[in-house]
Amino acid sequence: MGPKKRRRYAPQADLLEARLLERARELRDQAAALLPGIEKDALLKLARQAEAGASMTEWLRVPGSA
């Protein structure tokens, strides 16, 4: 076996919560450009999931907020 490789650590520039909220906004913007239908519903569902994920990360980040 050769030398053990070290993992590179690169900290995230933005908090996960901010990235999820930005993604939700992008999905809602895409959905707004579509006519009602399956694709629009799917984008809105993904946006809601991203917003829920952002809320969960906030709950986990803030001590004593349960």
Image (cartoon, grey):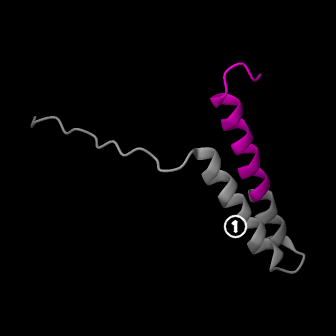
Q: Position of residue 15 (x, y in %)?
A: 56, 45
Q: Position of residue 43 (x, y in %)?
A: 76, 65
Membership of 55 in magenta stretch: yes
The residue under label 1 is which amino acid type?
A: Glu
| Residue 60 sits above or below residue 42 on the image | above
Q: Which residue is mark 1?
A: 26
Which image quadrant is residue 42 in?
bottom right
Residue at x 72%, y 59% (from the top left corner): 24
Q: Position of residue 54 (x, y in %)?
A: 70, 44
The local secondary structure at tag 1 comes to helix
Residue at x 73%, y 63% (from the top left corner): 25
Which image quarter holds the N terminus? top left
Q: Report the magenta residues as a range.
A: 47-66
| Residue 38 sits above or below residue 47 on the image | below
Residue at x 82%, y 75% (from the top left corner): 32
| Residue farthest to the top, as pictured | 64
Q: Position of residue 63 (x, y in %)?
A: 66, 21
Q: Main secondary structure of the magenta part?
A: helix
Membership of 3 in magenta stretch: no
- Left or right: where does residue 48 sit relative to residue 7? right
Residue at x 53%, y 49% (from the top left corner): 14
